[in-house]
């Protein structure tokens, strides 16, 4: 479905929320001044407050228009028809996001969100992937802290090995090396409500490593050793002591979905990723593993979730901006080339680092992805639409993130 001459290049739906404001600020300060955009939400007064707040950041650019829309199919279809790209930061997505996905898929409107709600994304793929392919809508969920850095990191390493050695990639060991950040109220509300909306069986099914892969996954199981599964302990010569990743269950299915789009001829038939967090030693690895398992078990109990609601930020709130400026996140990965020479194993090293709030990074990811989709031709366009992944925007998107402040390093190891 051709988009034709739409009124805007991008609409930020939920611009008055915590992440939505970061997105609006980055568009105001960094995107081209002729970028046509609007802010949207349910309250005109709140949206006007956002516009007034961001205007001093770049007084010389045209300020965004204001579009009021309720979370109803009719309103959202009308909103989607006005823009090339619809960015939504309105969560929890499993409560408020499905109708937005439906509206964009049906109208051929490109779509971005920042959910980490794997079971919801799994359901949206099942319901709307075919529709989006028919209308040509490029729809990319999980384009924030989950799972843009991880997906782009793996794509970068795979590309580097392919270009340097002409071979595919085997295992990628992907780690959160450092992360100093606090969750927003929206993130906490999402985690708590997930357990109210989905049963353990659906959560488990959606978080399987290959659950979102668009083609038949590799025959190899690539399962972790039983000792590691029981203890969370792993050690790598380059990355040190490792333990379970809290973001792994959201990131891995997206990365493996990207493998399916690019194909095993590019990524490699033995490609797979395992996700971890940096630990001090084996003891802290095991201790964190036990704590994480205990926390997940406790969250399944309704009284625990009810109690937590009284001690956390409310939706739309988050850590103070000054605190966010002192935060940081760093990812490091080792990618093993898929070669038959065991005497001379080849591997590539990747690093990404962001100085500042992870919600600021998420806003940057949304804004730069919207610009990329609206104005550039990428692999996502070649695929013709559908429920895609951040890495299908490729090098153009990664370069824009680097210019916006994301530190990136990629090299072959000796």
Image (cartoon, grey):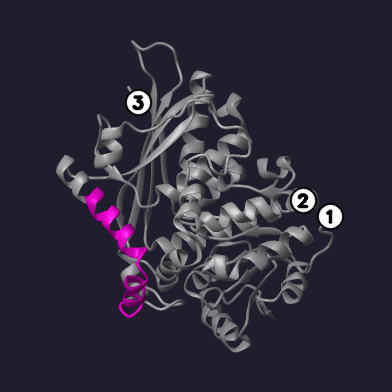
**Percent position of residue 208, x then y:** 48, 43
Q: Is residue 171 magenta?
A: no
Q: Main secondary structure of the magenta part?
A: helix
How packed mark 2 is, by other alpha carbons closer than 10 Å (few <14, some 14-19, many 20 or more), is many
Q: What stretch is highlighted in magenta?
A: 288-311
Alpha carbons under labels 3 and 2: distance apart: 40 Å
**Percent position of residue 338, x then y:** 46, 20
Residue 142, compared with residue 52, is above or below; it is: above
Residue 152, compared with residue 10, is above or below; it is: above
Residue occupied by mark 2:
136
Residue occupied by mark 1:
2
How packed mark 1 is, by other alpha carbons closer than 10 Å (few <14, some 14-19, many 20 or more), is few
**Percent position of residue 237, x then y:** 25, 29
On the picture, is 286 further left or further right than 402? left
In which quadrant will I find the C terminus? top left
Q: Can residue 33 be seen in this view?
A: no
- In depth, the one of 317 and 70 nearer the eye is 70
SS at mark 1 in the image? loop
On the picture, is 29 further left or further right than 308? right
Mark with earlier residue (1, 2): 1
Q: Does the magenta stretch include residue 295?
A: yes
Labels 1 and 2 touching (C-beta < 8 A): yes
Residue occupied by mark 3:
413
């Amino acid at each position: 479905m051709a988009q034709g001459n739409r009124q805007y290049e991008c609409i930020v739906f939920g611009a008055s929320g915590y992440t939505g404001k970061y997105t609006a600020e980055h568009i105001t300060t960094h995107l081209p001044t002729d970028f046509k955009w609007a802010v949207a939400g349910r309250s005109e007064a709140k949206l006007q407050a956002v516009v007034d707040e961001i205007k001093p950041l770049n007084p010389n650019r045209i300020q965004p228009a204001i579009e009021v829309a309720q979370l109803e199919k009719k309103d959202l279809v009308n909103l989607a028809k006005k823009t090339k790209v619809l960015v939504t930061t309105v969560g929890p997505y499993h409560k408020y996001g499905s109708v937005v996905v439906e509206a964009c898929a049906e109208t051929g409107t490109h779509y971005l969100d920042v959910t980490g709600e794997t079971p919801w994304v799994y359901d949206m793929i099942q319901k709307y992937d075919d529709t989006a392919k028919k209308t040509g809508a490029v729809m990319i969920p999980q384009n924030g802290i989950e799972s843009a850095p991880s997906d782009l990191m793996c794509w970068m390493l795979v590309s580097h090995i392919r270009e340097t050695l002409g071979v595919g990639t085997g295992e990628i060991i992907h780690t959160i090396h450092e992360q100093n950040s606090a969750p927003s109220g929206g993130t906490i509300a999402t985690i708590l409500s997930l357990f109210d909306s989905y049963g353990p069986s659906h959560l488990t099914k959606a978080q399987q490593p290959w659950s979102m892969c668009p083609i038949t996954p590799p025959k190899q199981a690539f399962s972790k050793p039983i000792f590691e599964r029981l203890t969370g302990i792993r050690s790598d010569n380059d990355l040190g002591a490792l333990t379970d990743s809290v973001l792994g269950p959201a990131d891995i299915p997206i990365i493996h979905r990207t493998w399916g789009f690019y194909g095993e001829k590019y990524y490699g038939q033995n490609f797979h990723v395992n996700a971890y967090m940096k630990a001090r030693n084996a003891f802290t690895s095991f201790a964190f593993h036990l704590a994480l398992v205990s926390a997940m078990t406790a969250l399944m109990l309704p009284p625990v979730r009810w109690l937590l609601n009284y001690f956390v930020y409310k939706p739309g709130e988050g850590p103070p901006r000054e605190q966010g400026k002192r935060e940081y996140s760093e990812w490091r990965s080792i990618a093993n080339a898929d070669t038959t020479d065991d005497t001379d194993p080849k591997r590539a090293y990747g690093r990404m680092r962001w100085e500042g709030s992870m919600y600021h990074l998420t806003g940057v990811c949304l804004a730069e992805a919207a610009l990329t989709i609206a104005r550039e031709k990428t692999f996502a366009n070649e695929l013709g639409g559908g429920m895609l992944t951040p890495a299908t925007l490729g090098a153009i998107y990664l370069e824009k993130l680097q210019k916006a402040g994301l530190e990136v390093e990629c090299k072959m190891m000796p």
